[in-house]
Amino acid sequence: MATKRPLMWSNILFILGYHVALLALLPIYFIYFKTSWLLFGISFALLYSSGLAITAGYHRLFSHQTYKTNRWVEAVMVFFGTLATQGSVIRWANDHRLHHAHIDQEEDPYTVARGFWHAHIFWMFRQQTPIDKKVVSDLLRNKLLVFQDKYYEVLMVITNTLMTLLIGWITGDYVGAFVISWLLRMFVLHHFTWFINSLAHYWGHQNYSAEHSAVDNYILCLLTFGEGYHNYHHTFAYDYRNGIRWYHFDPTKWLIWTLNKLGLARGLRRVEKSRISKQMISEHKRALLEKLQGAVTTKRTELEAMASQLAESLTNKLHSMNELVAKYKTLVKDRSSIPETVKLLKKEIQQLRKSLKREWSYWRRFSKQVMRLKAA
Ligand SMILES: [Zn+2]
Ligand SMILES: [Zn+2]
């Protein structure tokens, strides 16, 4: 059992203090003051920009380096990230890198192994380990981040105060700007971010790996700017996407993609499709075999053999597909290639794709049947 660190009263008083202030001021504001859609619109835009600065900036850019950008974009991310009131980039990335490196262990600052509420909020109520220079050595070479870390508290108060005054001036509602654009926005954004440490390690599906507690949860994606595909993220943390399908709700991914198209982001890292599929098959197979171990069935041995055989066949076909596609790309680039050979290869790829599709849907039906089996 690890010894408990001393309480961090500045964090406790700040977090509890603003929760109490919000609870008291919100009803007073709605009863005694006239609010406007303009105020809510601006507050929502600020919620989204400060939230995306955390997910696209603090998280996917600075903590994981899933893409590169220029100093100007970095500065914008740091500015809106400071408004989010979640500490400096260096502190945030230090904790987050430890979270990934030691997930579910004592060294993970917000390990869910110590309970839901520890992961959600209580971990911030105790003194944290000092920033490990080896963990964030790359970020310590960035002057802007070092400056933000050194003057974080002052910068956080100044940026939020100026933003609140600006919104108050635009809307003519200074009280609303304070209660809605600052307090309520901070409350919502804090809990949305904290959900990733708590709920995204509790409630959902483990589609890619059961070796860590992270889960994919589509509802959380809506609240966390796409960070709810957390099982995928912990399995492939260097991918700039968390939601890998085009229809997955991941506004952070869409923002990074747009920055790339505008020439403001480069080197977007993504995991190969076939590698993701192989990982998924391997995880499904593990889950099926585990289910069969404790299921009521007279065909356990046959079903186990089938699960292994189907998984192997799918993996082999994916491997062949990869090889064929690579070969095809080389042939297309090579001007001396014989058109007939290219045509034949294309046909082979199409046939293999069809066969893969068939086998994949059979695998899914088979998986469903096994997962429906009753436990002994
Ligand atoms: Zn996590
Ligand atoms: Zn991460």
Image: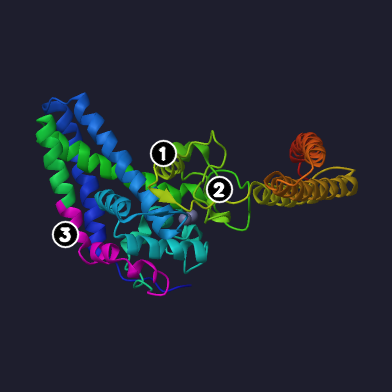
The foreground one among 334 and 126 is: 334
Instruction: Give the side of residue 224 with respect to residue 235, left or right.
Output: left
Find out if the beta carbon at label 2 lies less than 8 Å from the nearest ligand 1 atom: no
The residue pinned by badge 1 equals 223
37 vs 148: above or below: above
**Residue 117 visible at all:** no
From mark 3 to mark 1, how far is it between C-alphas? 29 Å
Q: What amino acid does circle 2 point to? A: Val
Q: Is residue 147 magenta?
A: yes
Q: What element carries label 3?
A: helix
Instruction: Report how far apart the C-alphas of labels 3 and 2 lie in the structure.
Output: 36 Å
- Residue found at x 45% / y 39%: 254
Q: Earlier in the sequence, mark 1 or mark 2?
A: 2
**Horizontal relation, residue 342 to residue 139: left or right:** right
The amino acid beneath tag 1 is Leu
Label 2: which residue?
215
Q: How crowded is mark 1: few (under 14 residues within 10 Å), some or many (20 or more)?
A: some
Q: Tell me if residue 29 comes above or below residue 76 in the rendering.
A: above
**Three-letter code, disc 3:** Val
**Between discs 3 and 1, the one toward the N terminus:** 3
Question: Quadrant of residue 61 in the image?
Answer: bottom left
| Circle 3 residues within 10 Å: few <14, some 14–19, many ≥20 | few
Q: What stretch is highlighted in magenta?
A: 133-158
The numbered disc on residue 199 is: none
Few, some or many residues within 10 Å of mark 2 (<14, 14–19, 20+): many
The residue singled out by tag 3 in the image is: 154
Alpha carbons under labels 1 and 2: distance apart: 15 Å
